[in-house]
């Protein structure tokens, strides 16, 4: 797989732009899926996933072919998703503690604001419900949970993609599961 | 949970990550067997994971890759190249026509190669010196002048277009050419010239053609 991809990359670097389309076709479903889970909108997912490929194309000469291309392209995509999520909430500092709510930061405040009435959630179909629960997760847990459970990536690869220490990724997966448990438990 | 070992919750997550050591798994199982509260917590965590695992994989929408390709930054040369490629792929009938043109060009190419003889449009007043055609000083050539596989030296005046195919052109300071001057050395220039002249033959409203016929 990596060999084939590197072959295509070298073709693109030599000026054969059409070879890039083959790279896109190899990764488009996974990239689109991750973007959709993180953003919760099909249009946005398409826009951001396509943008990720465009960025990859423009920076292809910087890609180290000894590394995994999937890690690299996932990193570009998740960074774009996180930027997009943050831009949607431009008025808060997400990590800031909210006065009088000990231990709760803005993440949980935002999550609480997006809650739907119980009856509405109960009427949801399974797929809708899954996406609803992922969407309610704070962004820093959403990215690790998405990569872990939608893409089934190993923790070390998630650490590489998000450029975080392995320990941090583990902690976020744990907290993400805990947050999900609480979300579901309150129903 | 007040009497529970601190690490039990950590073990639950390690178990769910598939990273638990066998002896720790044993500790976890033994504790869960005796502690209802921890068993409930563990069940709820497993349930959360089970919900995530219900998520269906997703396909990128139709036309996704094509959309990426149109969004790529392109140098003009690449744009031209891929543009032509895509166009050919999308228009198979026209591609066949293009192939026909290429074959035609090959036929023309062979004529380009084999037709090595020196030739010139004969006009009165022209002087031939070996492989060099001379338009003498003070002389006026009326009409177009084509020299093939030979050189052209212009000292006088040409009232028309001058074309030199695979040859050199010398212009004296007294030279006057009222039309276009063209030198054809490369194969593609040659093909282009052939096509132009073929088209000229096809357009009936050209006065020069009507004059000669
Ligand atoms: Zn316990």
Image: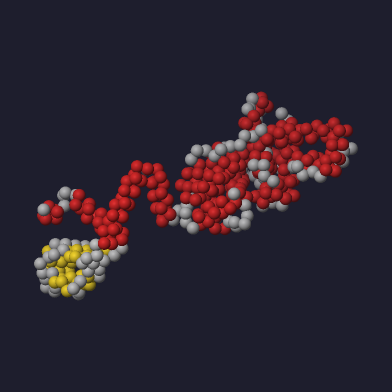
Q: Identify the image quadrant of the C terminus of chain A.
A: top right
Residue in the picture at 34% in, 48% down:
B99
Residue in the picture at 67% in, 49% down:
A157
User: In terms of depth relative to the viewer, which is nearer, A173 or A81?
Assistant: A173
Q: Residue furthest front?
A: B114
User: In terms of depth relative to the viewer, which is nearer, A125 or B85?
Assistant: B85
Q: Is residue A49 visible?
A: no
Q: Quick check: A148 left or right of B113?
A: right
Q: Quadrant of residue B50?
A: top right
Q: Quick check: B99 left or right of B14?
A: left
Image location of residue A114, percent across then percent down:
65, 34
Image location of residue A73, percent across then percent down:
59, 49
How many marks can you see? 0
Q: Is residue B115 visible?
A: yes
User: In terms of depth relative to the viewer, which is nearer, A180 or B79?
Assistant: B79
Image location of residue B199, percent across then percent down:
22, 52
Q: Quadrant of residue B132?
A: bottom left
Colour mapping: secondary structure
Residue in the picture at 32% in, 46% down:
B97
Q: Quick check: B177 left or right of A162?
A: left
Image location of residue A180, percent across then percent down:
71, 36
Residue in the picture at 54% in, 54% down:
A7
């Amino acid at each position: 797989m990596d060999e084939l991809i590197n072959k295509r990359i070298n073709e693109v670097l030599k000026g054969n732009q059409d070879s890039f389309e083959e790279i896109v076709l190899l990764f488009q479903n996974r990239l689109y899926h991750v973007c959709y889970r993180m953003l919760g909108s099909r249009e946005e997912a398409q826009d951001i996933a396509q943008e990720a490929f465009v960025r990859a194309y423009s920076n292809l000469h910087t890609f180290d072919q000894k590394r995994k291309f999937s890690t690299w392209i996932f990193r570009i995509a998740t960074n774009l998703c996180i930027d997009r999520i943050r831009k949607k909430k431009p008025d808060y500092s997400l990590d800031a503690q909210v006065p009088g709510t000990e231990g709760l930061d803005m993440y949980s405040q935002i999550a609480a604001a997006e809650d739907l009435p119980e009856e509405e959630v109960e009427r949801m179909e399974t797929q809708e419900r899954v996406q609803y629960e992922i969407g309610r997760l704070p962004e820093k847990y959403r990215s690790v949970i998405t990569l872990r459970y939608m893409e089934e990536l190993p923790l070390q690869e998630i650490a590489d993609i998000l450029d975080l220490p392995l320990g941090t990724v583990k902690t976020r997966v744990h907290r993400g599961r805990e947050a999900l448990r609480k979300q579901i438990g309150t129903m | 949970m007040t009497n529970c070992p601190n690490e039990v919750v950590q073990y639950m997550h390690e178990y769910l990550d598939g990273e638990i050591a066998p002896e720790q798994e044993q500790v976890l199982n033994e504790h869960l067997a005796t502690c209802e509260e921890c068993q409930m917590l563990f069940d709820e965590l497993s349930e959360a994971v089970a919900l995530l695992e219900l998520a269906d994989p997703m396909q990128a929408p139709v036309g996704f890759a094509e959309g990426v390709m149109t969004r790529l930054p392109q140098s003009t040369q690449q744009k031209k190249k891929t543009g032509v490629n895509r166009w050919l792929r999308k228009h198979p009938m026209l591609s066949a026509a293009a192939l026909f043109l290429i074959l035609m060009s090959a036929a023309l190419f062979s004529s380009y190669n084999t037709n090595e003889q020196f030739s010139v449009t004969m006009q009165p007043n022209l002087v031939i010196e070996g492989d060099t055609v001379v338009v003498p000083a003070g002389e006026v050539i009326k009409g177009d002048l084509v020299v093939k596989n030979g050189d052209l030296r212009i000292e006088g005046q040409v009232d028309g277009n001058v074309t030199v195919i695979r040859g050199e052109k010398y212009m004296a300071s007294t030279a006057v050419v009222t039309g276009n001057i063209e030198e054809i050395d490369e194969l593609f220039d040659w093909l282009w010239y052939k096509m132009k002249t073929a088209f000229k033959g096809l357009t009936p409203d050209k006065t020069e053609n009507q004059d000669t016929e």
